[in-house]
Image (cartoon, grey):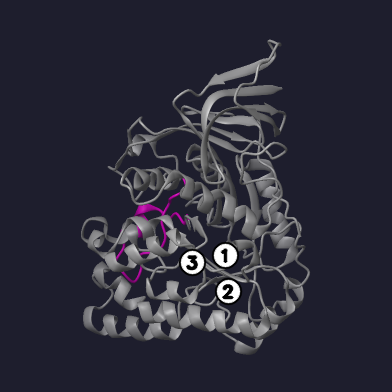
Amino acid sequence: MQTLIKNANIINEGQILKRDVLIDGEFIVAIAEEIKVTTNLVTIIDAKGKHLLPGMIDDQVHFREPGLTHKANIATESRAAIAGGITSFIEMPNTIPQATTQKLLEDKFEIAKQTSYANYSFMFGGTNDNLEELLKTDPKNVAAIKLFLGSSTGNMLVDNQEVLEKIFSSTKMLIAVHCEDENTIQKNLQAHITEFGDDIPIEKHPVIRSEEACYLSSSKAIELAKKTGARLHVYHLSTAKETALFRNDIPLKDKKITAEVCVHHLWFDDRDYKEKGTLIKWNPAVKTQKDKEGLLQALLDDRIDIIATDHAPHTLEEKNQVYTKAPSGGPLVQHALLALLEMRKQGKISIEKIVEKACHNVAIMYQIEKRGYIKEGFYADLVLVDLEKPQTVTKDNILYKCGWSPFEGTTFSSTILSTFVNGNLMYNQGVFNDNIKGKRLIFNR
């Protein structure tokens, strides 16, 4: 089956070019100023005036399956993801049970094989006592190792320094880390509980999960990576101060230490707690306007390498509890790309830079095979967007199982029209293809 996308404004490798794109099966087979076909067996899509992007690759999501499926599952959240222009995701190990053995990890891959609309991979979760199992992880078939150096669930907090050094020294795989210093956080939390009880004002969240807690943990992880030669990736930076720990004087492919920023840390700041309350309670916390601006600057000057979502849904009932009981995290995959495109309209970031950080660089960093670009011979993971068609986020059009969004009531200037996954039109103006599923990501390692 062939599909011809005509007259599209293609965003790829820093350029916007008007081109036709021919898809045959799973792959892009031709890109040219004009492609003519002589058979009626080709589906033709006229994309005149529209923009064609590589599918976004989200390297940090929590889809809650197995064990927490009252909040979300792989089917519902991957469906929301492709409606949001995300064609591949990498999911975290802190489900129930946690993916801390090879068998439990493969169980998650099997669920995704049956139910995921998007392409998928999962991370193996490190603990204080599973090094032997961790070292069995296949670098070609598994995205990375995930370590919680703060804010963990279950027994996934890795706080044994000797174990950390062994993990960093023993694996050649990318190690992705959540960096917040737990001792600092607990000290701050207890002081606020003493003052307020459980009903701590949400505005205190970035005081409890402070700049100090983030910087202390990030700097220690980077110091250990430099000492051991480990390949380190620091998730969801939330402070301007942390950005000084990263470099931009070498190409991404040569970096041993990389960083990520999430959409919510680029969009919200502490002024938004008054309106949004615990709906924007994340770990690490949304911090100041100065931090938000510093993160964007570091993204633009390449100290920060990629953009992700940290999609982590909870039910509204859970989120609407008092501070100490309300969980951190929120749903983002359906609206992340729309938010980035809105930032483009505001003049904060170019569409070329969005594609670089959300598509190209994720593929480079994880060494993902044949994805992240619009190139001949690559998988046809593509997103067609209309930059001049506004839409408002309402309860009626939210696809997350949890049924809410921190962007509810926001009118975005753009609309995601169509999403192709492995050459298949999986989402088209509100209609889903339920008959085909995504593929397991493979890594060139």
Mark 1, Cα crowd under 10 Å, few <14 / some 14-19 / many 20+, is many
In the rendered image, residue 332 lying in the magenta stretch gets the answer yes
**First along the sequence among labels 1 and 3:** 1
Which stretch is magenta?
A: 311-333
Measured Cα–Cα span from mark 2 to mark 3: 28 Å
Q: Are the residues flagged by discs 2 and 1 in contact, CB closer than 8 Å?
A: yes
Looking at the picture, which amino acid does disc 2 mark?
Met
Q: Position of residue 69 (x, y in %)?
A: 53, 52
User: Mark 3 belongs to which amino acid?
Assistant: Arg
SS type, badge 2: loop
Q: Which residue is mark 2?
A: 156
Q: Which mark is residue 94?
A: 1
Q: Nearer the viewer, mark 1 or mark 3?
A: 3
Q: Residue at x 66, y 16 (%)?
A: 36
Gap in Å between the C-alphas at discs 2 and 1?
8 Å
- CA distance for labels 1 and 3: 28 Å
Label 1: element kind: loop
**Residue 303, labelled with which disc?**
3
Report the front residue among 290 and 287: 290
**What secondary structure do most residues of the magenta stretch adopt?**
loop
